[in-house]
């Protein structure tokens, strides 16, 4: 009898589950269908709308979107307030305390809620400074939290802070005014100066460029003096566009200790944290009392959008799909995915960003790579134009020459201007390579090992080329942490990493050539006296013109020494939905601070509703 | 039976202890130090993504590796680290330096090296996600497997049997992520559909939540149904060959009665025994689905923290997983014991 | 009635004559068509793997960057991938990898699981308790964590994959043979064997092992499928066999996933191959179990398929025939 009841209950449960699941499935089907139909139909309408808009732009009529002249007299669509900007990322925020910014991936977190001294000028003509690379020259910046600065002597900088800036209205700071004290506090805390002299600098953040600061001094509420240990002509570059301490209030640290949570974090940047779910999303709302303004329309306070969302999507296919369906507004993609997207989603707006090149750093302290003939042969074996044409679809530079032609043209030396024996190395010549190897003592090639942390087509191709000249390479696939430990251990034969392209030139030079032994990223274990000397001169040269010339010379020298094996650079794309307006693909306005860029973009909510049927 | 139960439960303790020791040691023994990883990310060299914020000035302060290790509590010997983590040795407080017990025995699972936050809350929010996915998947699997499996056994070698079993095994054979990729790529391209990218917890909005969960759950469930179907089919076939079924048949009972009253009941009971392992498999196993469908669950969490060498989190999360698995194993063992009188009366 | 049963038994006898293997194959094709299909698939896969060098039109790491992403054509029957490698050739070589990894890992896992399970289950007592604590501890780790840990220690590669999947799988699966050992330990004839003084080894080797063999064989064929799928999942997460070895899992789990729109053939064909292989292996295993498992004989199962329907029909026919014969006798 009991068994019967049990049996009956079980079957009832099963039936119930079946019914429930089918009900859910039915509603889901309907809803999905609804969106589908709307989506498809309105996409066509949207395309028509965009076309109309373009025509109107040309005709300069007042119907449709409102066109106005910006501060430089350019005719643009009038920005509107409201809406949400949604982007995606692949890494979680790890901390909200600038002091603890251990990993580099906090550009969305820290970069959105905190402000810095100086940053890029949004009104600059994009043909002059596109912001599509990471290096922003000082002349294109304007004061953010600082209003102006003076450099009376090489060891002193006087910073005049902007007045009337307020922190976000959150306890314990409660929206009070930002003063020079706060800036001093932030710098001292990060660099272990003043009251933090005993504690020492943060071990977490790579602010080594600020190590030249001796002390900071507050003159009055809005004036700060920075005393230098030694002259560093490039120092202002480090105030906002390279590396910089972020201005944060002492009350938060005093009350909550270091590494406070997102609920406790307070800054005076354009965004305030609304909600953070690890592995899911970060949501920011606009800071209503942010001092910042749109350089194109100086009377407009920013941010324009009400909300800024950063979604964490690990899987690339899902990100692509999310862009297509309008769930995210923007995506950074490689050229292949970009071309496919552009072809199939004509409404997307896009910008091509000049790419970085991958280089393979060979370990010179190891045989056979210590011999320049071997290094040269390994470069000769690679068919650079073929890679550029096929693997990169012509989107890039076959001869990056350490300094990307597009991103760092001032330091780029074209192939035909290099010395002849250097030029030889960059011409595809497998026979010549084999001969060179034989000359160096390896007529039958040799075995090599290449550590990798992920599968890479480029690596596969390079290995195939090397195999043609007798170098048999085995891939050692390791997962992230093991890989990191391995490459910093010094036992590697070669290491791939990104070079040139979009970084600041001295960063580039420093990165692949640490110069002195002991610097952790000196993967090549290089110690070339000529190069060392050049680098020292670059670092200390006060005259910017001479410095640029020296850098160009350094790049050229490094290239002809075959310090690494180069592969063509490849451009990438930034694609975004048409309702994200005012955006032209800018990568970086402020150091590691994406939020500042998006604070200046605005969302055309009507257009978004037309195209997707959704409102924020 | 009671003696058996008590003994069985007590035996969990040494197992768990073993687990904590193994996981604690293993994570440190494998190549890949957390500080190296963090430094690498900071330099941003090998990732090629947003790049690091490091630049070398002329008189630079180089990154103090030893200081980072000290602050993370990694500069002390491993067995002391273990003792502190378990809660038998005292830990100095980060700010004040006071010594206090602060480990597992005190209810503190540990803090993340990366976020420096207590991981208990993170686990509490992730566990339901994976559990829900697992439950829905198991439900789907059984809904498909039970009718197919039983029918295949009763009507062995009919066309429907072949069809049903083929479908079930095909769904097992097809890698779920392969199907999911095809679905997502073509869905986005031609149907303007893509998975929801913002997770909504069940407690917040059950309808939205189920909408998000249903596709991954169905994908995983159909893949699982193959195994369950096979199990059920075998059991039912065995039951049908039992003497008492033959007797019933010989007695002249109709097929329907035989199946419903005798065969089915006895076939379904052992199903319970594999119910537990099914759920267990899913608790740690849905990493791929969680990743593709943007579900903040335990599988993804454990994988990520392991890759990030977040030692305390890995140890703590594995402990939770171990406790859960042990419970499931207990349930399974008890059900076997219940079914098999020989063990029961030992 | 007894006459009918006798006649049925006679039919059974017929099928048992002749060599076991030939009979088995005959029964497979006659009674288990799905299993036969599976068996054919498995055979094709094995042959493809063995004869890969002969069959494949190109080498598996032969790159033709100019022809990258070519759709299927007469030159490249299944198209090319992102480096211009021929997909067909890579699928063919992939069969070899899957076959090697699948077989080796499953053999290893079977050896591990049976040795641990049988000894632990049979010897019982303290030995069992201690061993089981280790096995339980092992079960407490999610599979992925174990794979990751082991792979971090010993690197990624085909041999490592085999070791990892084999040993890990073996330990997890040891509970099956263990419960079998429990069951058979209590059986009367083993007790009898013990009574006459047979040594433990003899019992294990002579009695336990042969009896568990059918289950092992079945578990084996299904295990191969599991290994192939596990390798695919690991490749998806980036921990599979490193390039340029063309494992199917790596082909569908790697960057090709988002090249789907440009070139769906890159992940389509390996995926199909993988699915078919796992399907075949599973169906074959099921059929083998149906035909070979002692627990599935007896009753109405021994007639092979069609269960009660066939039995009833056969019985009706026999009864009718018996009637006719009787009538003949009566008349005659």
Image: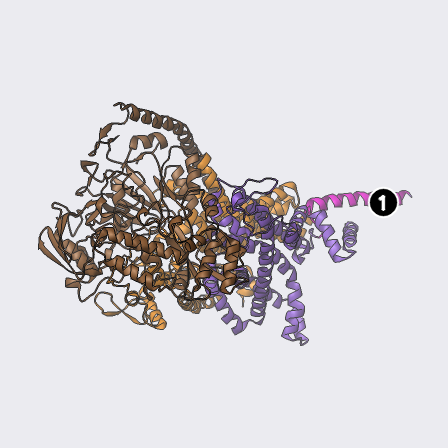
User: How many labels, in total?
Assistant: 1
The residue closer to the viewer here, A511 or A96, is A511
Q: Residues within 10 Å of mark 1 (few under 14, many from 20)?
A: few
- The correct choice, above or below, for B11 with respect to A134 in the image is below
| Residue B257: image location, x then y, percent | 61, 45
Regarding residue A178, the answer to whether it shows in the image is no
Residue at screen point 67% across, 71% down: C192
Residue identified by numbered label 1: C325
| Residue A25: image location, x then y, percent | 45, 38
Magenta residues, as a range? C302-331
Give SS at disc 1: helix
> Farthest residue toward the left?
A220
Q: In the rendered view, does A234 fall on the left or right side of B343?
A: left
Quarter of the image for the C terminus of chain A: give it.
top left
* Picture colour for chain C: purple
Per the picture, the main secondary structure of the magenta-coloured stretch is helix
Q: Residue A549 lies in magenta, yes or no? A: no
- The correct choice, above or below, for C329 with respect to C289 in the image is above
> Farthest residue toward the front?
A420
Q: Residue C320 lies in magenta, yes or no? A: yes
The residue closer to the viewer here, C42 or C30, is C42
Disc 1 sits on a residue from what chain?
C
Colour brown belongs to chain? A
Regarding residue A64, the answer to whether it shows in the image is yes
The residue closer to the viewer here, B259 or A498, is A498
- The correct choice, above or below, for A73 with respect to A267 in the image is above
* Picture colour for chain B: orange
The residue closer to the viewer here, B191 or B318, is B191
| Residue A235: image location, x then y, percent | 21, 55
Q: In the rendered view, does B59 fall on the left or right side of C197?
A: left
Residue at screen point 34% across, 71% down: B83
């Amino acid at each position: 009898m009991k068994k019967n009841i049990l049996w009956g209950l079980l079957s009832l449960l099963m039936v119930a589950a079946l019914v429930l699941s089918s009900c859910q499935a039915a509603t889901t089907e309907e809803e999905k269908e609804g969106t589908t139909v709307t989506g498809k139909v309105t996409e066509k309408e949207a395309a028509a709308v965009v076309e109309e808009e373009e025509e109107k732009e040309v005709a300069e009529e007042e119907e449709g979107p409102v066109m106005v002249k910006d501060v430089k007299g350019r005719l643009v669509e009038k920005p509107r307030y409201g809406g949400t900007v949604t982007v995606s990322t692949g890494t979680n925020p790890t901390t909200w305390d600038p002091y603890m910014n251990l990993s580099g991936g906090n550009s969305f977190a820290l970069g959105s809620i905190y402000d810095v001294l100086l940053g890029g000028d949004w009104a600059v003509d994009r043909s002059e400074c596109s912001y599509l690379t990471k290096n922003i020259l000082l002349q294109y910046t304007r004061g953010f939290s600082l209003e102006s600065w003076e450099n009376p002597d090489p060891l002193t900088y006087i910073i005049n802070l902007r007045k009337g800036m307020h922190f976000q209205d959150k306890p314990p700071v409660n929206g009070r005014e930002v003063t020079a004290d706060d800036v001093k506090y932030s710098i001292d805390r990060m660099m272990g100066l003043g009251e933090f002299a005993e504690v020492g600098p943060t071990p977490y953040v790579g602010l080594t460029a600020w190590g030249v600061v001796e002390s900071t001094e507050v003159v009055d509420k809005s004036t700060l003096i920075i005393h230098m240990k030694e002259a560093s002509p490039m120092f202002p570059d480090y105030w906002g566009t390279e590396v910089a301490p972020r201005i944060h209030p002492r009350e938060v640290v005093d009350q909550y200790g270091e590494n406070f949570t997102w609920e406790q974090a307070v800054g005076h940047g354009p965004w305030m944290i609304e909600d953070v779910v690890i592995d899911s999303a970060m949501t920011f709302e606009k800071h209503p009392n942010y001092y910042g303004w749109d350089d194109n329309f100086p009377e407009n306070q920013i941010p324009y959008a009400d909300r800024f969302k950063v979604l964490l999507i690990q899987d690339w296919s899902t990100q692509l799909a999310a862009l297509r369906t309008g769930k995210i507004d923007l995506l950074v993609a490689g050229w292949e995915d970009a071309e496919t997207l552009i072809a199939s989603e004509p409404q997307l707006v896009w910008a091509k960003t000049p790419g970085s090149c991958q280089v393979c750093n060979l370990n010179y302290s190891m045989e056979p790579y210590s011999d320049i003939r071997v290094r040269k042969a390994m470069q000769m074996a690679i068919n650079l134009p073929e890679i550029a044409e096929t693997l990169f679809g012509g989107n890039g530079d076959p001869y990056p020459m350490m300094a990307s032609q597009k991103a760092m043209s001032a330091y780029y030396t074209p192939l035909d201007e290099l010395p002849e024996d250097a030029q030889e190395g960059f011409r595809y010549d497998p026979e010549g390579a084999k001969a060179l190897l034989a000359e160096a003592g390896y007529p039958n090639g040799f075995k090599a090992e290449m550590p990798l942390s992920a599968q890479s087509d480029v690596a596969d191709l390079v290995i195939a080329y090397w195999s043609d000249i007798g170098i048999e390479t085995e891939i050692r696939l390791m997962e992230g942490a093991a890989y990191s430990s391995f490459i910093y251990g010094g036992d590697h034969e070669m290491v791939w990493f990104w070079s040139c392209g979009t970084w600041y030139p001295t960063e580039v030079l420093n990165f692949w050539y640490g110069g002195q032994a002991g610097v952790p990223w000196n993967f090549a274990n290089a110690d070339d006296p000529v190069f060392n000397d050049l680098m020292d001169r670059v670092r200390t040269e006060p005259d910017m013109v001479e410095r640029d010339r020296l850098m160009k010379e350094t790049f050229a020298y490094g290239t002809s020494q075959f310090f690494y094996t180069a592969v063509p650079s490849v451009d990438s794309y930034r694609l975004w939905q048409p309702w994200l307006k005012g955006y032209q693909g800018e990568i970086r306005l402020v150091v590691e601070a994406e939020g500042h860029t998006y604070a200046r973009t605005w969302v055309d909510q009507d257009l978004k509703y037309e195209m997707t049927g959704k409102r924020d | 039976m009671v003696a058996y139960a008590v003994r069985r439960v007590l035996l969990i303790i040494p197992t768990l202890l073993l687990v904590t020791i193994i996981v604690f040691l293993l994570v440190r023994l494998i190549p890949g130090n957390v500080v190296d990883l963090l430094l690498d990310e900071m330099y941003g060299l090998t990732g090629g993504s947003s790049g690091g914020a490091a630049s070398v000035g002329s008189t630079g302060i180089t990154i103090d590796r030893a200081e980072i290790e000290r602050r993370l509590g990694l500069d002390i010997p491993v067995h002391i680290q273990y003792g502190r983590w378990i809660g038998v040795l005292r830990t100095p407080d980060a700010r004040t330096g006071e010594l206090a017990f602060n480990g597992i025995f005190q209810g503190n699972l540990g803090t993340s090296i990366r976020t420096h936050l207590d991981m208990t809350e993170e686990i509490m929010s992730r566990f339901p996600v994976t559990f829900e996915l697992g439950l829905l998947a198991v439900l789907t699997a059984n809904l498909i497997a039970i009718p197919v499996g039983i029918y295949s056994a009763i009507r062995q070698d009919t066309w429907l049997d072949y069809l049903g079993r083929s479908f079930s095994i095909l769904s097992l054979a097809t890698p779920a992520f392969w199907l999911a990729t095809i679905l997502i790529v073509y869905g986005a391209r031609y149907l303007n559909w893509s998975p929801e990218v913002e997770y909504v917890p069940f407690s917040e909005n059950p309808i939205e939540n189920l909408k998000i969960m249903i596709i991954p759950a169905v994908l995983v469930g159909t893949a699982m149904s193959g195994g369950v179907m096979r199990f059920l089919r075998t059991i039912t076939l065995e039951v049908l060959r039992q003497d008492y079924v033959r007797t019933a048949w010989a007695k002249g009972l109709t097929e329907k009665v035989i199946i419903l009253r005798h065969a089915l009941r006895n076939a379904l009971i052992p199903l319970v025994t594999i119910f537990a392992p099914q759920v267990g498999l899913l608790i740690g196993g849905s990493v791929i689905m969680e990743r593709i469908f943007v579900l903040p669950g335990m599988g993804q969490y454990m994988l990520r923290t392991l890759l990030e060498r977040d030692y305390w989190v890995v140890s703590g999360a594995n402990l939770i997983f171990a406790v859960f698995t042990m419970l499931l194993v207990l349930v399974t063992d008890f059900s076997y014991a219940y079914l098999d009188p020989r063990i029961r009366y030992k | 009635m007894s006459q009918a049963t006798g006649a049925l038994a006679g039919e059974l006898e017929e099928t048992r004559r002749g060599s076991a293997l030939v009979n088995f194959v005959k029964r497979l094709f006659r009674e288990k068509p799905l299993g036969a299909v599976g068996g054919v698939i498995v055979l094709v896969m094995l042959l493809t793997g063995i004869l890969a060098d002969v069959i494949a039109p190109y080498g598996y790491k032969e790159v033709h960057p100019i022809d990258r992403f070519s759709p299927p054509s007469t030159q490249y029957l299944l198209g090319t991938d992102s480096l211009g490698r021929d997909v067909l050739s890579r699928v063919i070589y992939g069969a070899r990898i899957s076959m090697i990894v699948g077989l080796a890992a499953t053999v290893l896992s079977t050896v591990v699981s049976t040795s641990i399970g049988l000894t632990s289950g049979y010897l019982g007592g303290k030995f069992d308790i201690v061993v089981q604590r280790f096995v339980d501890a092992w079960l407490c780790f999610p599979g992925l964590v174990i794979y990751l840990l082991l792979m971090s220690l010993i690197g990624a590669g085909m041999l490592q994959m085999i070791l990892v999947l084999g040993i890990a799988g073996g330990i997890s699966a040891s509970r099956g043979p263990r419960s079998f050992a429990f069951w058979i330990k209590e059986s009367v004839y083993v007790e009898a064997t013990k009574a006459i003084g047979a040594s433990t080894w003899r019992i294990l080797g002579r009695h336990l092992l042969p009896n568990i063999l059918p289950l092992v064989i079945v578990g084996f064929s299904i295990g191969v499928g599991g290994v192939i799928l596990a390798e695919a999942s690991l490749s998806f997460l980036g921990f599979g066999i490193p390039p340029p070895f063309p494992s199917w899992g790596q082909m569908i789990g790697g960057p090709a996933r988002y090249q789907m729109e440009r070139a769906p053939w890159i992940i389509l064909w390996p995926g199909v191959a993988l699915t078919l292989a796992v399907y075949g292996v599973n169906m074959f295993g099921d059929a083998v179990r149906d035909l070979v498992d002692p627990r599935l004989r007896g009753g109405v199962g021994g007639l092979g398929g069609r269960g009660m329907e066939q039995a009833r029909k056969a019985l009706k026919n026999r009864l009718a025939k018996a009637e006719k014969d009787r009538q003949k006798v009566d008349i005659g």
